[in-house]
Image (cartoon, rainbow, N blue to C red):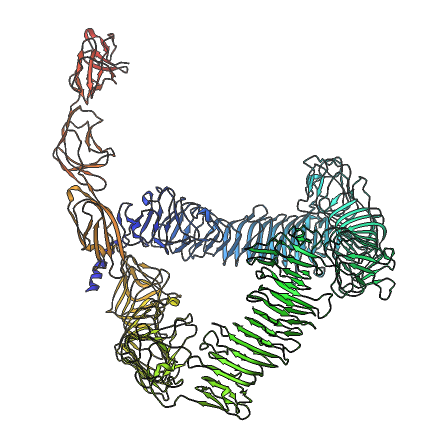
Amino acid sequence: MKLKLYLILFFLISQSIFAQNNYYWVGGAGSWSDLNHWRIGSSSGQAATIIPSRYDNVYITSGSGFPASGGTLTIPSSATCKDFIIDDSFTTKLSFPSASVFNVYGNLKWKSNASAIYSLSMNLFSDSSNPTPNLIDVPDNMIDPSYISGSYQSYFNLNGNGTFKLVKNFASNGFFLFNINENAFLDTDNKNINTMVFTHSSSAASNFRSSTVTSTSTMTLNSAANLTQATLSFPVLNIQTTQNIKKIVLTASGYSQISGGNLLTVDEVAGVGTAGGSFIGTQFNFNKVNLYACTINANLFKGNDMVLGDGSADLQGTRFEVKNVTLGKGNNIFRTTQFDINNLTLNGGQYSFRQTTSNPYFQVNQTLIANNSCNGIIPKFAAVEPTLPLNLILPASINGNGKASFNGYNLASVRLTGGASITAGIDGGTNTGNITYPGITAKTYYWIGGGGNWNDPAHWSFTSGGTSANCIPIMYDDVIFNENSGFTSGNNIINNGGTVATIRNMTWNNAPANPVLNINTTLYGNLYLQKEMSLPASVNFIKYNAGDPAVNRYMSFEGQKVYQLTIYGNDNFYLMPSNSGTPYDVEVGGVFNFDNNALTSNLYADGRKIKAGELWLGGNSVNIDNALLSQTVLNILTKQTITAPNTTAYFQNYNGRYYSSGNTNHFFGKTYKEGTAIGSIQYLNTETFQVNSGDIRFFGINKTKNAVINASSNITMSDVTAKLTITDSWLFNRTDCDLILNLTGQGGNNLILGNNINGNGFTELNRMNISGINVSYITPVAGAKPINAKNSIDNGNNSGINFLATTSKNFYWKGGYGSWNDLSHWSLDPSSARTTANCGLPTINDNVFFDQYSGFSTTGITAIQMTNDVSVNDITFSGLTPGARSYFAGNNNYYKMNVNGNMVLHAGYYDAGYFSGFTFVNINKPTGTLKNVTPNGASTSLTFSGDAQWKMNRGTSQYDLSSSSNISQTDIAGNILDISGTLMNISNFNLNGAKLIMDNADLTVNNSFSINTKQPVVNTTNSVIKLFKSSGGSEADIAFSNQNHYFEKIEYTNTTTNTDYIISFNFPGGVINNFIIHSAIASRLDKVNPSILLKTSMSVNNLTIEKNNNVSLEGNLQVSQSLKILGDCLDRITLASSPAQPRTLILPNYSSNPSNYVIDKVQIKSISSSGGQTYTATSSTDLGGNSGINFQDVIPSVSRNLYWIGGQGLWRDPQHWSLTSGGTPVSACDIPTAIDNVFFDQNSGFTSILNKIQIRGTYLSKANNITFNNAPNQPVLDFTTDGGNPYYLSVYGNLTLQSDVKVVVPMSSFGLTRNIVMFPGTSTGRTRYIDTKGAFIHLNINSQDYFELKSPYQGDINFLNAAGFKTNNHPMTLVNFSWNQSINNNPVVDLGQSVITGTRTNSVGTPNYYMPSLPYYNFYSPYFLISSGNNQLTVNADAAKADMGYFTTNTPTGFNFGDLTVWKDGIVNTGTKVWNFNKMTFLGSTTTNSVSTLSSSGKYKTLYFNPGSYQIENSQTVTENLFMTGTPCNRISVIKSTAGQNNISLDPTATYTMFYASIRDMNFSRPVNAFGNSQDLGNTVNLAIVPTDVQAAGFGGNKVLCASEFPKTYDASTLYGTDPNATYTWTKLNAPNAGVMSTSPIVTFTQPGDYKVSVTYSQDGCNITENFTISSVALPVDSSTSSATSVVKQPSGDVQVKFKGSLAQTYIFTYSVNGGPDQNITSAANGEAIILHPKDQIGTFVYRLKNILFATGKSCPAEISNKEISVNVNPDCPTPGVMMLMDNVLRGCTASTGARRLTELTPSIVSNPPTDAGVTRLISGTGIVVKENNEVFMIRNTAALPETLTLPSNKPHIQGAIIYHNDHFYEGIENGKWIRVDND
């Protein structure tokens, strides 16, 4: 019956199959999917009930509700429609969000006041069935200008097989990708396209006509596009196969890339400016080519005319055939194998040949012209490789005479053949053939014309001040700049123009206006500059040929400063003196490089003054005495020795031997080190060396007679080879209060002084920090010490220095916060006055004090900043207030303080900010010096590094050192640390020195601990070491040296929490008197690793191990006096060997006194006794591998019945187990084993608060049968809520719960934890029962037994290789059902008639009892899994029903299943096997981007798809019913995610329903129709779309009723199409009578007002609410006037009949004429309708008005019964002379003219005027007057004079007649006279 109804419906609507709706957007900003924003037909039309489809047009108009400021129309996923029109009436602003997607199936019109933010996708579709093209009309700003970015690309896609046409140029901003796809055809209609990327992949021959297509990125074309008249422009073009193009214009700077495919034909290729192209393809046929530059690579290139400009050209490939070729001045490379050219023109460029293939040639057939470029570069025509010469074929007929000229060219590696001869300028070598070389004539050029570019030929002349030579000088030419060069102020700069000046000689002489030569210059001859100029460029001197003989060359700079100066060549270079009084003869801003390579040049510069950034003196010889050299770096590498005793050199760095084998004997008279940077001095030989600034660093051997250090310079000898010899004098003036400076060496004999230095053989140094300096005399003197060092520090490795006794200073800090190096903070005054000392900084010899006068904050923090390591003798804090805090801090570097004496800190001190603490040293003090350290509760790092004895003292604070403090001791002989009597709680304690003394010490260490002293630690009386370790993993977490130590007491506590570290304890030698291993702070139940690993065999007198420990032995353990290993039943102790090799617990006195050795509640593994003794372990567990241990109180091995007692508690607590119900606890630790049965009953003692059975530990909780029976207060199995360390309850028999049992299931980010595990018992194949009574549990079944449900099941269940499972028809509420089978045991899964319901929550929803929802799996859907692979099984499920998220199977065959409901976003996948389902229902998808998936093939009686998105990946068979039914809110989308089609096989008798469905890739076995705005998305078979205007919801918008229509009743049940079960609520919103009116489909409106209707779609709850207004319209009112009008018949003209409404609006009037049929007329906007009755119809005509109604909106007709308008048309003019009033106009008659209007009348004030309109009256003294409307007009002037008129015969004189004569009106009067009756 339903099928028949659909067939009838299809028949009824088939005639309107192409019907569409016009959708109008209203309401301003909003979402495309919001139905409240859509109206049908107009902006005021009815509300839409579904969003637009591909068959509907969309309009944005002035009524769309967007304000002037604009608004956003949001596109949730995509916007689909037919036409998308932004109407011309839309004048406000509109924006679309980023990534908006439009699917437009018709015309597109977009306006410039609408824009998308960015990343717009405009998908246009056209169908070949459409007779007209889809029009594209878009502006140039579709994208919001604020978001224009290359990162935000947009798409413009033409799809389908129809036609598109451009209305205007496409040039939108926004980086568009314009793609013509599929079979789409584009007609550009001569419009242009400008886009970022352009692609034509369509198979249709789109016609581009004469359009210009421009892309700013890539253009890709197939062969189908018709471009024979088009112009293309692009940076990248890809031709897929072949193409024929009218014109290509290249505009991009650089090279556009053209990939030409197999064949590219172009009529013209042109470039704009310097644009070039790179062409790669098989064959190019180009008619014309005109490019600045190009690269062509082709098998064959054919052309007529090729012109290449002055850019680069690279021609590659196999063969070029070109008729005419013109090449420019650029760099041209020819790689093509064969060139065949008719006519070739060269223009002075570089023409290089790299033809590397066999048999290459370059053939010119007719003419060859080689022009000289005159551009300053010698043109070249040559093969690059002499071994691959160019085969130049020139026939004997070339140029008509067999000769070709390459005059001025450099010809190289050319093999001339073909019979012609040529001439060339220069023989570049290896040429053959008939070639002659006349050479290149040198020229002299004069600069003219003022400023300009060097390479501008207009500036060069062959005469001084002459005309342009139109050439540029080359390397053989001379150039002159003089008084005629034309320089003026502001026109005096010579720029490079992108080139380099290469010439022979350059001369400047009297050139005016201080010219500037701003070009790098290379000279082959001499240079003469003038004073008044500048040359801010590089100057290079080189030779033409290195083998040419030496010549003299001259350089006169006149003191000018150049950027760089480089000189090479075996010539004699003379630096000429400046004649202009300049400070220097030449200045070089950068490098002055005199031949630092070949070393062949000779420099003559005696007496010269040179300044440079770097000066390199190389060459063969340098003559430079009596000179002044000033430079930052002076490098010497001249072959011959430079001897310049009268030369002065200033430098920062000096290198007297740049090469390792170079000359080291160069000598300069006076040398000065300048600059604040460190100066590197190497191989310096000088008379006087003076340092004026900065530090110095010596390399190599350095010698000076006199040394003067005038700066505070640190001096460094860089390595053991560095030496400094001073023969005569060394002055280094230092005062007692100067800052300490460093004199540092690396050993060796590095400082050598003259025996009589300073006249007495001694040098005085003061305030120096000296290390690694060995001083001696030139003539050695045994034991001599040539240096006396006062107030200096011997930092070791020195000799030959007499360190004078130093008097320590006491420095007192002042001024609070500040920098250590700030002299203003130091005073030598201990009083409160604290006068600033200005006597340097404290040294290692000085004491520093911080006290009550130091300016520290009394309550805050005082910081002292350090910028380097510092050293002091004593440091003392005293007198500070208790609240004061202080610290030393570095600055991005970890600085430290060296303390050479004693230290006293204060309690408020702590290390902070890049300060690494205090290092205690013993420098220049006797070994073993006793020093005191009193931390006083500070927090700091102390490093003891020296051969002294440090005594740490007890202070007044709780701890002497606390918090993050550290103590370390370095490996130095004599390094002794004494911490006796101290109390410390620190982080790290690591000793490597000689000795530790710690009597009466209390030391707590919280992190790293090691004692590796060279002497044993024995002074430990009354001491204790407390070790806390929270991390570990190394071999020496806690380590001691292998010495015979004796420690009085060591306590250890494992403080690890979640991380399971192995913490090693390495004590290889000595004895611990008392060793206590305290309980670990965190439970060890979750840990695998030991809490402490004893790494070596060790000896302890008294050992205590507390509970909650796992102690592992890697060596034997000897306990000599007492042992207490005391666990308990909850926190047992494990004692085991590591690894499995047994270890021995040595108890030498056990037999004589066993009571001193207690082992209780311990798990022991691989431990043996010593000496054949037998130890007793009470209440302990034998974990195997033990020997010599007697385990007492062992748990019985027979099955027991154990009863839970005592309420809440731990399963492993024996106090909760009894052998009787409610009885007493079991003895020892006899908790249940795998063979015991356990019971929870009414005597278990649970209360409402204390009702948890706490499961802790891995597999510690176990039983055979578990039974709950009437246990009170809802008992809870508590596995904790932490899934990181899961705990398990092991069941070896049956599981019986009671209905109110709860389970605390832990959460884990790694997966669901199944904490109750059913393991195999002593045998397999048993039948075991699961009777949970609906309690929610997670169950893992891991046993080859048969399992049956005894009651409903809730939770999660997983099977592994079970022998079978039977539900016994009980329902199951599951998170997951998982059946896994890896063996072939032929199980049976019998689901019977069970109903399986998926869930994310438990039945109660109480937090922590499986959570209301999974926080780790908020996306999670329950699954049903059966996986057996190829292992056989049987599934009985044909009567089962399941409601799950995922249904996945992997079985050897398919099975039958009853009803399956799949959650939203769910998946069904039965693999390759076809399962048979009675009914499968998909519930849909949750979001627009999610899908449900049917991955596998299946067979169904009913296959039902609810609204949502689906992917169907395989073929499906439906035997009875197929439902694909969406709703207005939620469509059906069915596609295949991969390529291809899916077969949907419908049995012939199967029914189907398809509404609101979008379908793609489906092949239906028989024709089907989809209704309700469904969509065919392509690649379908047997699918027909029937566009149906089905009203799914909505009242239809505002309604207007005539006042006479109330009350008005509507029946809305017909509005909702496919859903007769929709529910309604009608509400009146405003007073009066506001409230709900009706809840049924029928509603009656009794009055106008604001209303609302809410409609709920029964299928998916789709709710649509519409607000609307019912308006009342009053009936129209007629204002027409009944009248009668008489006129005279005339051949033309009309009489107006006027109907008029009461308002200025449009009406429709219904009337009849003389009782005839009704006729309608529509009024104008002013409410008047005029009927023009013609005057040529004689008679009386009565117009009767019968009805009036509104022409727009609600018509509301009103009947009219009393309005008539009569029109009387009289015959022609009556008797001549008669005057009558016609049409309210006074007219007169003559014999011939008929009735005529007299005149335009002039108003007059008249007494006694006529009172009736149209009446004339003769008024005495006035004349004849007439009343028209409310005005009275005079029609004859009484003052007019009678006239005698000459009239034609047909106008006789008649008294009283009115005639028209000579443009005037006359009236006949007596005596045959006429008088004018108008007023002109």
Is the C terminus in the top left, top right, bottom left or bottom right quadrant?
top left
| Residue 238: percent from left, percent from top | 51, 56
In the picture, the quarter occupied by the N terminus is: bottom left
Can I make out residue 1772 in this image? yes
1853, 469: nearer the viewer: 469
- Reply above or below: 1255 against 147: below
Q: Position of residue 757 (x, y in %)?
A: 86, 57
Question: How many marks on residues?
Answer: 0
Residue 1502 lies left or right of residue 1472; in this view the side is left
Q: Position of residue 260 (x, y in %)?
A: 53, 56
Which residue extends farthest bottom?
Answer: 1172
Residue 594 appears in view: no
Which quadrant would residue 442 be assigned to in this image? top right
Residue 708 image position (x, y, % from top left): 80, 53
Q: Is residue 415 left or right of residue 158?
A: right
Residue 41 against residue 995 in the figure, above or below = above
